[in-house]
Image (tube, rainbow, N blue to C red):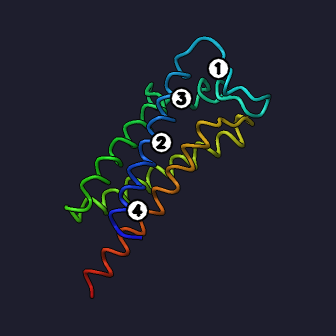
């Protein structure tokens, strides 16, 4: 996969993550039930998005996700011309993935409920981390050749 396609795919995944995080933020502040996200006892975004773990220092986790996806989008757009951006993108994606995995642990073992928006965001950040690592590895191989 060429580096321009790789970066474009990362950009698209960052936009998808931003949309999912934005929807989660709306649900976080919403007072009524979210119909499309309430799929039974174990799949309930409202339970997850309004739990005690949905904020860090009074900042909604979804807002942190939005900021992270915006950063990843910007890095993906400038990584072709600035090699250090690819490494920053990988570091940010790895940190985002670690945080998403922690939140998934909370869903599984503390809340016993899953949020489909959160799982979608987990998929997006997982793919971004993998693709960012591939971008850094291929760039380093090219530089060494």
Q: Earlier in the sequence, mark 2 or mark 3?
A: 2
> What separation in Å lies between label 4 and label 3 (alpha carbons)?
25 Å
Cβ atoms at labels 4 and 1 below 8 Å apart = no
Q: Which residue is mark 2?
A: 16
- Closer to the eye: label 2 or 4: 2
> What separation in Å lies between label 2 and label 4 (alpha carbons)?
16 Å
Residue at 65% in and 37% down: 116
Label 4: which secondary element: helix
Residue at 47% in and 35% down: 19
Q: Which residue is mark 1?
A: 34
Label 1: which secondary element: loop
Q: Earlier in the sequence, mark 1 or mark 2?
A: 2
Label 3: which secondary element: helix
Q: Which residue is mark 3?
A: 24
Q: Is residue 122 left or right of residue 10?
A: right
Q: Which residue is mark 4?
A: 132
Q: Earlier in the sequence, mark 4 or mark 1?
A: 1
Q: Based on the displayed image, in which of its 4 quarters is residue 68 positioned?
A: top left
Residue at 35% in and 59% down: 7
Label 2: which secondary element: helix
């Amino acid at each position: 996969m060429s580096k321009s396609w790789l970066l474009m795919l990362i950009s698209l995944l960052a936009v998808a993550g931003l949309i999912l995080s934005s929807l989660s933020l709306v649900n976080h502040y919403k007072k009524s039930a979210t119909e499309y996200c309430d799929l039974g006892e174990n799949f309930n975004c409202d339970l997850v998005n309004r739990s005690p773990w949905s904020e860090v220092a009074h900042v909604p986790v979804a807002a942190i996700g939005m900021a992270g996806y915006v950063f990843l989008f910007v890095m993906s757009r400038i990584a072709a011309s600035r090699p250090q951006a690819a490494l920053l993108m990988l570091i940010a994606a790895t940190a985002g993935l670690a945080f998403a995995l922690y939140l998934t642990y909370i869903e599984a073992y503390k809340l016993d409920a899953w949020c489909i928006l959160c799982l979608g965001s987990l998929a997006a950040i997982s793919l971004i981390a993998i693709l960012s690592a591939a971008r850094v590895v291929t760039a380093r191989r090219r530089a060494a050749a």
